[in-house]
Amino acid sequence: MFLLRLRNATLLALLTLGCLLIAGCGEKPQTAAETAPATKTVYNWKLAMTWPSNFPIFSDAVDHFAASVKTMSDGQLLIQIDSANKTKAPFGVLDMVNAGQYEMGHTASYYWKGTEPSTMFFTTMPFGMTAPEQYAWFYYGGGMELMQKVYAKHGVYSFPGGNTGVQMGGWFRKEIKTLKDLKGLKMRVPGFAGEVLAQLGVVVTNIAPGELYTSLERGNIDALEWVGPALDLKMGFQKIAPFYYTGWHEPASELQFLVNRQAFDALPKNLQEILVTAMKAETLDAYAHMFNDNAVGLASLRTEFPEVKLRTFPKEILDALKQANQRLVDETAAKDPLFKEVLDSQRAYLAKVRPWSIVSDYAYMKDNQEN
């Protein structure tokens, strides 16, 4: 019996060995290359931004965004950032992303108003939405869909990229009391606000950021607007112009991420989702960062430069600005169907949400205002 079991075991072993030696019997042993984990494709992208390197808050947002994408993708999507110092084309970002020279950009939509007037709505418009209202319009009121429609012809996707909130109305060497004080006033102001002010006799100019302080100091301009206390005090305008006016022209200046459509569409779905999520997260963080630094800057202004006088434009001037803005917007809408489509969307949405803004935030702050 023992010999029988031994013989059967030996026969089984021989059959097994033979089976391994004969092709097609059982599975072929895997090589080391076949058993190694699959290597993921690494995507190396470049991003061009309108801002110089180390530009407060704006470039910080881009740095944080790129770092988040790297972490969330486990190094599969890497984004190299080129500032305006390197590209030498701060206002050429849209063209560079469209051409595929860069996969992404960080800039502001209203810089492209000469090419596409409807792009202005995705930054801000005079007397328009506040930041919370505008974000609600983007994500729940059809704004994102309209933005993609506007930018589709330029070969890019556009996404919100951080908000400055209400920008200040500017620094003035002399106090503005009446409409006559605006006649012949030389002022640096960009965007649609410049066209509105020109209707009231202001001589509008656009000057590179690096030349603003010198131009104001030498009297080449009488006034300028920049952003708000968070960034203005770093420029030193408070040392020259003693009148600082509250805003009307940019109530919710949204920055912008641009993404080349072909590059984005070629990404795996998980990396697309990582990009969109990281952009949205950085948008909120940049807005909070700006709000905090504006509050800190205002406190510093009051303490260190008490001679600077905060002013609000007189009602006569604000009414004239509103009328000029309404006239110019309607004239443009009559000539540009896409501009009119976005304008109508924003007006309808603002009519819907502004009553809540008044009942909630405005009423709360008005009734609980502290001196």
Image (cartoon, grey):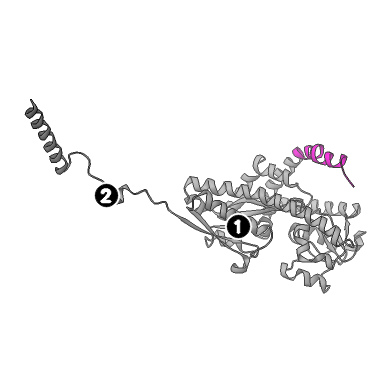
Q: Position of residue 333 (x, y in %)?
A: 72, 50
Extreme residue in the bottom direction: 218
Nearer to us in this view, 294 or 119: 294
Extreme residue in the top direction: 1
Instruction: Give me the residue at 65% from left, 65% from top.
Output: 52
Nearer to us in this view, 56 or 52: 56
In space, the residues marked 2 and 1 are separated at their CA atoms by: 43 Å
Mark 2 = which residue?
A: 31
Is 205 placed above or below 116 here?
below
Q: Main secondary structure of the magenta part?
A: helix
> Residue 215's quadrant in the figure?
bottom right
Secondary structure of the residue carrying numbered label 2 = loop
Name the amino acid type tagged 1.
Answer: Asp
Q: Nearer the N terminus, badge 2 or badge 1? A: 2
Instruction: Give me the residue at 80% from left, 37% from top.
Output: 360
Q: Quadrant of the N terminus?
A: top left
Q: Is residue 357 found inside the magenta-colored segment of the image?
A: yes
Q: Is residue 255 found inside the magenta-colored segment of the image?
A: no
Nearer to us in this view, 168 or 66: 66
Q: Nearer the viewer, mark 2 or mark 1?
A: 2
State the extent of the magenta-drawn residues as a range.
Answer: 351-371
> Residue 64's quadrant in the figure?
bottom right
Is 1 placed above or below 212 here?
above
| Residue 228 seen in the figure | no
Mark 1 = which residue?
A: 63
Extreme residue in the front direction: 2
